[in-house]
Image: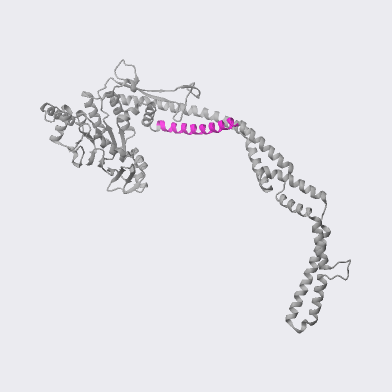
Amino acid sequence: MRIRSLGVIDDAVVELSPGFTAVTGETGAGKTMVVTSLGLLLGGRADPALVRIGAKAAVVEGRITMSADAPAAVRAQEAGAELDDGALLVSRTISAEGRSRAHVGGRSVPVGLLAELADDLVAVHGQTDQQGLLRPARQRQALDRYAGDAVAVPHAKYAAAYRRLRTVAVELDELTTRARERAQEADLLRFGLDEIAAVDPRAGEDVELAAEAERLGHAEALASAASVAHAALAGNPEDPESLDANTLVAGAHRALDAVRSHDPALAVLAERIGEIGILLGDVAGELAGYADNLDADPLRLSAVEERRAALTQLTRKYGEDVGAVLAWAQDGAARLTELEGDDDRIGELTAERDALRDELAGRAQALTDARTEAAKRFADAVTDELASLAMPHARVTIDVRQTEDPEGVEVGGRLVAYGASGVDEVELLLAPHPGAQPRPIAKGASGGELSRVMLAVEVVFAGSDPVPTYLFDEVDAGVGGKAAVEVGRRLAKLAKSAQVIVVTHLPQVAAFADRQLLVEKTVDGSVTRSGVTVLEGEDRVRELSRMLAGQEDSETARAHAEELLAAARSDA
């Protein structure tokens, strides 16, 4: 990794060993920034307060060696990244204003992708992770992770039944709690549909009746106008001497027709006048028929107005015209059918809920059985590891229990509470010595014991769910003496199958490392490129002496440091 402008680090390169790398240095020298840098490369939260004062941005770049078919490599390549000679180049930039950018394999990517890759690359453990292990929910997750498919398969079946039960329960609750509102809505719909059915409107009827009402309301004026127009066109039978349009046009046509053979132009005009005479005759006939057929019945007009008033009552309530009223009635009938079917639906959902609760109970029992079996294996494996960590008489057990709940599901003849992860509460118990009662590790483990339990759990995980790299940030806190040597020895063993990075203040742990890095500040309080150095030979002895006695040149401390290194080499 290359780290620039992050906290106390100005510009430094951190070269990590494939095996066991120990990062040491004085308190406040910047060791934790190494962990923070790796966290940023793995999608950790970008805090602008991490940017070094006076710098515009902090940058962390990493080169991660992996095969092209590794899960992280495959996921990165799906996002458009490219491997560089068997390595994935990752970078993270945080501006002083708080903006964050990520690049993987030469491609700009969302920060979330880094977190996805982290799941397959690194397991990070620090003091906060130890505190997380104290929570029962995290302990259940740890057990499930250890058990693998033995728990994952029944858990998936349980989760599917649980999700369906929740869906059915929500729908059923909504239907039953809203029964009054649904009944009121149904009554309103029935009233409206009955009112529309009583009137029984036809599509377009309102337009037709409006036209008829207009005609009937002006029947006398229409009849008079038709009669006058007819007399003008066809003559008045009561006055034979009166002139009419038909007579005048006929006279004009006869005059032209007599001489049309002498001029083609005049013949054309004669033809047109003849057509006018025919048109006038047709119109006159239609006017006569219109006047004869015109209905001036006031009773019919009254009936039309009554019908229009009934339709107006509907359009005032249910739509702007009869077409909209009919559409409302169609939608209302469908909604009423749905509401009236709710009672049947409630019965169906109730039966399905009860069946799902029975199914969930069976799934929960299978999940509990799988966890109980895995818990014994997990506890035995962690106990064996603790024996290798200077806790030979400690005994770890895992309590898998349930909480009774009258509203729960029946498991083992009892009604117990249930949730998305099953009915089980899982708690890690520790009996540090024979005769001691097993107690929750939150209450029964000292700081040093908790660190060793955490390490033992991770070593057990390494055999069942391996990741390429483990990062421990001072998980050896509270450990000393022989226990510290055993922690170092166990970390060295873990490093045979994975890369292990440990930030430590214990020389007993650092002595077992394949590579030791020293983080040092300069006089101005920063860590520069030369501030992270690989310690070898005499330099490593001096650093271990400082860690042992606070005196690099103490002969006693040097002898002890050399003894630690020799013991670690012989153990390897």
Above or below, comparing residue 7 to residue 224 in the picture:
above
- Magenta stretch: helix, strand or loop mostly: helix
| Residue 536 in the figure: left or right of residue 187 | left
* Residue reaching furthest to the bottom: 262
Above or below, comparing residue 78 to residue 435 in the picture:
below
User: Residue drawn 45% across and 30% down?
Assistant: 420
User: Residue drawn 74% across and 77% down?
Assistant: 269
Residue in front for this viewpoint, 230 or 526: 230
Q: Position of residue 36 (x, y in %)?
A: 28, 37
Q: How is the image coloured?
A: one colour
Q: Is residue 200 visible?
A: no
Quarter of the figure with residue 42: top left
Above or below, comparing residue 283 to residue 379 in the picture:
below
User: Residue drawn 47% across and 29% down?
Assistant: 363
Q: Position of residue 39 (x, y in %)?
A: 30, 37
| Residue 491 in the figure: left or right of residue 265 | left
* Residue reaching furthest to the top: 435
| Residue 344 in the figure: left or right of residue 194 | left
Quadrant of the rendering where the N terminus is positioned: top left
Q: Which residues are magenta?
A: 150-178
Quadrant of the rendering where the C terminus is positioned: top left
Q: Is residue 542 visible?
A: yes
Residue in front for this viewpoint, 240 or 59: 240
Q: Position of residue 164 (x, y in %)?
A: 51, 33
| Residue 425 in the figure: left or right of residue 526 | right
Q: Is residue 126 magenta?
A: no
Quarter of the figure with residue 41: top left
Q: Is residue 154 magenta?
A: yes
Q: Position of residue 327 (x, y in %)?
A: 65, 45
Please give the count of numbered marks on the rendered protein.
0
